[in-house]
Amino acid sequence: MGWTLFVDESGHGETPGETLVVAGLLLPAGLHDPLQRDLRARLEGIHAGLPWPPHAAMLNVPVAAAVASGTLPASQRSAALEALRLPLRELLDGVKPDDWLALRTADAAVAERYPDLYARLQALAQARAAAMARLLADLGRTAGPRGAVALVAADRVDPARDERPLGGLVVRDAYLRLLRLLLERVHALLWHDERGVEVVEAVVADRHLTLAQGDRRVPMVSRYVAEIADEAARAPFLVEGDRRRDSVRVVSTGRRRFHGEDVPAGLVLADWLANRAGRSLRRDRDLAALGASLDALALHGLPRERAPALAADGPALTTLAWGGEARRRVHEAAQRGERLPTTGLAPPRWVPEATAPWVDAAARGTWR
């Protein structure tokens, strides 16, 4: 049985100092498994009367649902949303579902001029959010090494740290560094010595990347994802030449735009996770407070910890990760076989707590 990893991000990744978040939903099923069809059916039910795919950032704005509903043929519209959209046509006329500034402006105008209608739009948004929470809780009920899990990697954008490797096709900017970190964690958690090769199909939401030569911006295609996945597979948790390195193989499923009917359900869920996790991760707090916030806003029962398959009886490791120096200390602990301190890592406060268990496992040779 294979896996599918759906990946999306929150943040532009271009503003120095901003916190970029990359989230992954790891499902114990292939891309064409019945589970994927079941998730699509549930998501369509939750977002009935809205175009596919539902986009978390837009639907955080209550009036956006009414705007989006109006783009559908009359036969596909939601009666509840139509009852609200029609009285608001004057304010919503000409507003596009992907025009963030216009949506925000219209939302504020509706809240001020039609508070009762706005309250009903808010109630519909809250009902959709509650249904999403139930869906994720259902996914989280399958515990253990074959259960679904959310992985989240974050870091502050610093163009001075961008990497231009001699043999690489693209610059390792903040986004690609976090994608690589996320894939390293996938390998470390799934490597095994029992079942042959397990394939992880990576479904990564599209974005533009900078080529290492020429500084041209290009769309992300399979070969760029494959390049980052190959680097992630070489993370030093297992010594070079260890046959167990080959027990997991990450493959790219191709360019995946977040637009149109062919967007898989898992990518919609990854978009939700990235958007909601971003709200939690952009506040400076300790690990306990962050975990409670993530559980309430984003995960709703999806586990934040997973024991590596190669050390199933050992302690569970957090699936939250910070890039930069925190990642380097984990790698150095694995290479040197000794525990390195996690004190002195840059804020936020949760980073040393989340990094320490990975440093300990790496130093003990948990994966060896």
Image (tube, grey):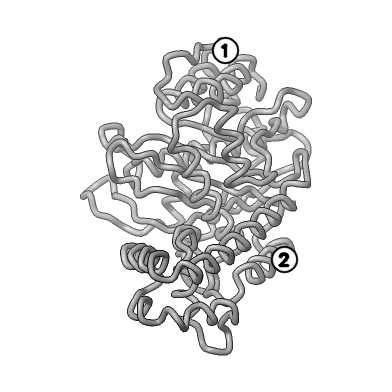
**Which of the labelled discs sits on residue 217, or is there none?**
none
Q: Amino acid at mark 2?
A: Asp
Q: Is residue 115 above or below residue 130?
A: below
Whether the residues at callouts 2 and 1 have beta carbons within 8 Å, the answer is: no
Q: CA distance from mark 2 to mark 1?
A: 44 Å
Point out residue 155 in the picture as x, y percentages from the top left corner.
41, 35
Q: Nearer the viewer, residue 324 or 129?
A: 129
Confirm whether residue 83 shows in the render.
Answer: yes
Point out residue 37 in the picture as x, y percentages from the top left corner.
69, 67
Marks 2 and 1, the one that precedes in the sequence:
2
Taking the image as shown, residue 223 lies to the left or right of residue 38, namely left
Mark 2 packing: few (<14 Cα in 10 Å), some, or many (20+)?
Answer: few
The residue under the point 38% across, 77% down is 92
Point out residue 257 in the picture as x, y percentages from the top left corner.
45, 64
Q: Amino acid at mark 1?
A: Gly
Would you name the residue on which mark 2 appears? 38
**Image depth: mark 2 or mark 1 in front:** 2
Confirm whether residue 249 shows in the render.
Answer: no
The residue under the point 56% across, 19% down is 356
Point out residue 141 in the picture as x, y percentages from the top left corner.
77, 47
Would you name the residue on which mark 1 appears? 337
The residue under the point 50% across, 20% down is 352
